[in-house]
Amino acid sequence: MTLREKTYRQFFARSDASERLSGANRIMVIVIIAAVTLTILSTEAAFRTVHRTTFILVEFAFGVIFTVEYVARVWAIAEEAGEHSVLARRLRFMASPMALLDLFVVLATLSPFFVSDAAMLRLVRLLRLAALAKFGRFSRALQELGRALAERRYELFVTMALALMLLLFGATALYWAERDVQPGAFGSIPRALWWAIITLTTVGYGDVSPITPVGKFLASIVALGGIGLVAMPTGIMASAFSEAMQRRRDAAAVQGNGPQV
Amino acid sequence: MTLREKTYRQFFARSDASERLSGANRIMVIVIIAAVTLTILSTEAAFRTVHRTTFILVEFAFGVIFTVEYVARVWAIAEEAGEHSVLARRLRFMASPMALLDLFVVLATLSPFFVSDAAMLRLVRLLRLAALAKFGRFSRALQELGRALAERRYELFVTMALALMLLLFGATALYWAERDVQPGAFGSIPRALWWAIITLTTVGYGDVSPITPVGKFLASIVALGGIGLVAMPTGIMASAFSEAMQRRRDAAAVQGNGPQV
Amino acid sequence: MTLREKTYRQFFARSDASERLSGANRIMVIVIIAAVTLTILSTEAAFRTVHRTTFILVEFAFGVIFTVEYVARVWAIAEEAGEHSVLARRLRFMASPMALLDLFVVLATLSPFFVSDAAMLRLVRLLRLAALAKFGRFSRALQELGRALAERRYELFVTMALALMLLLFGATALYWAERDVQPGAFGSIPRALWWAIITLTTVGYGDVSPITPVGKFLASIVALGGIGLVAMPTGIMASAFSEAMQRRRDAAAVQGNGPQV
Amino acid sequence: MTLREKTYRQFFARSDASERLSGANRIMVIVIIAAVTLTILSTEAAFRTVHRTTFILVEFAFGVIFTVEYVARVWAIAEEAGEHSVLARRLRFMASPMALLDLFVVLATLSPFFVSDAAMLRLVRLLRLAALAKFGRFSRALQELGRALAERRYELFVTMALALMLLLFGATALYWAERDVQPGAFGSIPRALWWAIITLTTVGYGDVSPITPVGKFLASIVALGGIGLVAMPTGIMASAFSEAMQRRRDAAAVQGNGPQV
């Protein structure tokens, strides 16, 4: 096997029996996680100013790694089966969303001098992580999850519509009860919607809350009656997910050990 | 088919095989959602004052649409099967709750000069949206949900009674422990009930919370022991809903593809 | 049937086929709910001072009703089957917990002049409501719930022990991280426990929360990892309850309509 | 049976038919719980200064008990089956993690004069409690729970990865929207992560919350969409636990009463 063949396998291999990421892709996962962590830390002034030189050096190292990876991919794509010329294959690959994302990551990493807010750009690397999830075991699990959600799209739609109506109803009730006393927090329905969302998700910051007896009475009723409704779409998604995983496990059990149920 | 026949089908058709809303009703759903959104935004002074003219014009347009729809319905109802005269059918339709709601929406949209708080009136349009849910797929799903809830009315009653008792017990405990230190927040059982509801739904604004050691101890016990109890009625409703949807899906599978289970 | 027989049936009847409360007991449920509501409202100074005379009169009326009920019960108990003399039966009834509770309610209602805090005493009426739950359909449901909980006492014990350990662990971690900066809120483990309970039940008042980076980091880990653990005992209770209700419904279906499953 | 044999059985017995803790181990559980409680209370200055002498005496008593227990264990281990000499067995036991933990507890209890913060050291006793859980019924339940979690390690990994991505996404969105207005709370992504964690676990202290309209809009979307995702790993753990307990109960039913299912 030539080096180019090996490189191609490492970066583009998919659907092998073991369903595991190739060595090169695993290293890239670790590099990307490290790069994302560094980007997150670099937004904190306390870190940035103290370790300024370290940050620049490590970012430069990441830039080199991403560049090497990009070049290696463009070089190795020539191994792809197909009737087009090597150049045509390379150009087509370079125009694909994944390669454009790669290129964007390289540019974002290497150009902190051109853009004022490089940190935000660099978080695009997270998308690279998601793109890598396309390979290996993740891929099938996410597909199955997607199918399970699609199957329940109707429940999701009905419960979300009911939850939205409840949010709107609660916001209107509190707008009516509190707008004169707290015009800042309840002076319009959009403002009251902030209260309704923070209350019915049970987050409850306390930055806005009713203070009149009527407002507290209405808020009590909305809270007692509505929390379950707002929690329903997320509950449906959670059960869809666990069902999809169960189905996958059952299928694996059948394949691996012969029929069991 | 005459135009009147077509109009009748568009506005009143029900239970066709596809279980989908007719074209006219779909347009009305979009118009109502747009109108409700506009009403919500119009309560915010920041929007209202800047886009004053736009608001008036768009509201006028909505008024025209709702008027045309109302007139079209009254006109097309003549197609309804029945032995009464056309006038009798029209009058009976105009006296029906749905037509009265339509009329109310038309008047509320067109008369911002007569009432001081037109915004609240206009939210009645949300009810129109609910009325449209009577048609199409929503209808059967909501009926089934209602049946599932009715079947469990007993569990709901028992858990709600227990939850209410717990709320009352918690409020009394904190009233006893904190009323001298915080007369504003815990000076009476109704006031302490506000604390109990906001705590046991886990909203926890923090506008009222115990400050004495005894109060904190009692609140800890009430919180640890009671949150599950208050969440139970909503849990029962959620499982009733998901069961109803499952039953519907099973029935559809049987009808569509022959018996499967 | 003599009046005394009828009275006996009304007040003491149990386990009749319909499983419904007798007329007299239903009236007492309503009276007790009204009396409890009045007591709750009477703790609020705003109501108490304005409707002072009304409160006294209605409380007096409740006192009369409770007295009449007590006397009627003592009188009617003579109908009870048994070999003892009527006087012996009456004395034994008067010494029973339920009759003592009745007497206590009568005294609490009629003696606001002897005790400074009659409101708290009067809430004992809630226990009367619980005592009435002994009759009719409630009774069997609560028994079954009790059995379901007893069956899972082991899960409940394990999860509660784990949850308590987690609360203690979280409190110790935050005590260690924040005690120097916030001695008032985290200056001892019992104080930090208040934070741990309010956080892990997701109530989150915000009266105490970590402010140091280390404290926030530890609190994040405790919150992300621990919320599910603290919610588990309540989840187990909820599922035990819904299972008990399902079993009851299945049994009713079998009894009422012949075997179905 | 000699005294040493009895002592050995009491302290080291495992897996007897009844699956219950031996008498000595039960007493130690109670002593450890009492000692932990005392340690917790002793961190509170209000208790410590008032009951100073009591605390010292009781801690001394606990020290004596733990010392006696340690000596008794070292003495009784000679009964263990094996070919080594008694001394070798004792030394090997003293080098085992459990005996070292015992020794550490003894030293921590008896040496408040050497260390400044004895309270933290003494909490190590909690680990002793966990070590005792190795005996009796707890042991098998915890093993089964561990197996259930291991079986679902894949779901846990996927949901945790998704939840972490969502937390990061939410934090970045709010960092972008609020960093200029609230540099203290949202001035970097790590700071915004504190907000994201406290919001998506629905704790919601309210120490940090968005104040700009854009920030509130983004926070609403993150809260409505993301709470279910963050709750999923804990939900999976909870269902794994309840499934493991169910399996155990079924197995017990089969063993105890013959096959039932």
Image (cartoon, coloured by chain):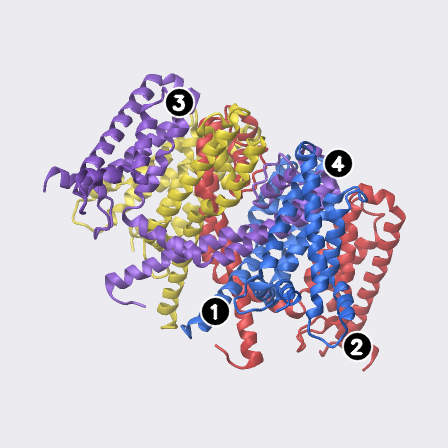
Chain colours: A blue, B red, C yellow, D purple
Q: Position of residue B45 (x, y in %)?
A: 81, 41
Q: Residue D115 — which label?
A: 3
State how far apart marks 1 and 3 are (Cα). Answer: 56 Å
Q: Chain of mark 1?
A: A
Helix, strand or loop at label 1? It is helix
The disc, 3 or 4, on the residue closer to the chain's N-terminal end is: 3
State how far apart marks 1 and 2 are (Cα). Answer: 55 Å
Left or right of D225? Residue B47 is right
Q: Nearer the viewer, mark 1 or mark 3?
A: 3
- Disc 4 crowd rating (10 Å Cα; few below 14, some 14-19, many 20+) is few
State how far apart marks 2 and 3 are (Cα). Answer: 91 Å
- Disc 2 crowd rating (10 Å Cα; few below 14, some 14-19, many 20+) is few
Q: Chain of mark 2?
A: B
State how far apart marks 1 and 4 are (Cα). Answer: 51 Å
Q: Is A6 in front, or is B168? A: A6
Q: Residue D180 — which label?
A: 4
- Disc 3 crowd rating (10 Å Cα; few below 14, some 14-19, many 20+) is few
Q: Are marks 1 and 4 in contact (CB under 8 Å)?
A: no
Q: State the quadrant of the N terminus of chain B.
A: bottom right
Q: Is residue C26 visible?
A: yes
Helix, strand or loop at label 2? It is helix
Q: Residue A252 — which label?
A: 1
Residue type at tag 3 = Val
Q: Nearer the viewer, mark 3 or mark 4?
A: 3
Q: Are marks 3 and 4 in contact (CB under 8 Å)?
A: no
Helix, strand or loop at label 3? It is loop
Q: Is residue C71 visible?
A: no
